[in-house]
Image (cartoon, rainbow, N blue to C red):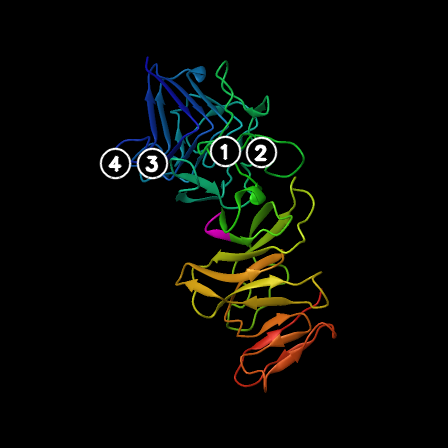
Amino acid sequence: GTTLIIRNSTISGNQSVDDGGGAVFAIDSAIVTIENSTIVNNTAGDAAGGLDMAGPLAATNVQILNSIIADNTNTGAGGDDCNTNSDPITMNHTLLEDTTTCVISGSNNVTGSDPNLSALANNGGETPTHAFASSASPAIDAGQTANGACDGVGANPDITSDQRGITRAQDGDLDGTADCDMGAYEYVPINCGIQAAGEPAVYNFFEDVAINVTNDGTDLDCISVEQVNGNHPNATSSGSADALETGRYWVIEGFQVGGTTPATNDFTYDLTLPYTGADADSRVCEWLEGIGPGFGWDCQYSSHVANTSVTRTGITGFSDWAVGDQVGPTAVSGLQADAASPANSWLLVGLLVGLLASVTAGMATRRIRSR
């Protein structure tokens, strides 16, 4: 029968109008091997938008390892991601979101969970990939690792880089051990080499998070960005306005060579954060905990791309960051909040715990909280 081997590949956005298997269709004596591949967002009119193993197939004829099969659509009867016609297929260390009509044998699989992927995009390399939208994805560091790389099925060689060419395996969950990720994309939690790259240089993370290092100083060499889906625990709300409860925040850290010692000297960067409601009222907000005598949020604005992103320039420190919406022109920094009309609009922060102030002259109420 026909032999099909899929390695380190993304299959996304395909459609089978009348039949099953928007991504892969196999029947009878076909031999199918899928390793470290991402099969998502495919559609079929019947029998699974992802894989249709129509059979009869022996369990050993279909071997799937270290892969992601999720977010596919079946507009007919049966499951969305996989169909096996009751014949089991062999699957190990693979995320299968919808197990309906899919009979599998094997171990260390993740079933019923969303892999938390971003849209298909240019994430580096020669071909588009689906990056992880969050470091909390259950597919990160969940693959089968061998010799510091991703294991291959049987005697197949190990996979030493992802679809983009990024080295596998990475310590994506920062537990001290480099483990292979499921799928075609290997999550990299930290970006190093800034001192050698020179400046200015732009570093991209997740969905349109961009850091433009304009001055790397004497010791900034690595940047780590963790995106958290949800409001910051200290996010504030101002009634009907969204304020800082905009659904995501980012923990951004900078390190010296080696990626462990914090960078401290004379660096400057610009930060662009994604926000679908971005306009002239949007702000890039820094959580000030542990930075000088101030507390609360420092919200400033340099530019925006409508309904896409907001940018702040001239940043000299690392912290937690969020997008503020309609937080007003006040920027809390150090001991003073500077208003658009400083002659009649001011407040002091940092000396009083739990201070709640209303800024006059038509400005919105800001609530400043200590922890």
- Per the model, the C-alpha gap separating discs 3 and 1 is 39 Å
The kind of residue tagged 2 is Gln
The kind of residue tagged 3 is Ala
Disc 2 packing (10 Å; few <14; some 14–19; many ≥20): many
- Per the model, the C-alpha gap separating discs 2 and 4 is 39 Å
- Per the model, the C-alpha gap separating discs 1 and 2 is 9 Å
Asked whether 84 or 336 is in front, the reply is 336
Asked whether 284 or 155 is in front, the reply is 284
Whether residues under marks 1 and 2 lie with C-beta atoms below 8 angstroms apart, the answer is yes
The image shows residue 69 at horizontal and vertical percentages of: 44, 33
> Which numbered mark, 2 or 4, is in the foreground of this view?
2
Task: Residue at the far left: name it.
Answer: 18
The quadrant in which the C terminus is found is: bottom right
The kind of residue tagged 4 is Val
Q: Which mark is residue 202?
A: none
Q: Tag 4 or tag 1, which sits nearer the N-term?
A: 4
The image shows residue 316 at horizontal and vertical percentages of: 61, 59
Read off the magenta span: 206-211
Q: Which mark is residue 77?
A: 3
Disc 2 target residue: 170
Q: Tag 1 or tag 3, which sits nearer the N-term?
A: 3
Quadrant of residue 222 in the image? top right
* Residue 70 position (above or below residue 276): above
The quadrant in which the N terminus is found is: top left
Asked whether 209 or 55 is in front, the reply is 209
Give SS at disc 4.
loop
Give SS at disc 3.
loop
> Which numbered mark, 3 or 1, is in the foreground of this view?
1
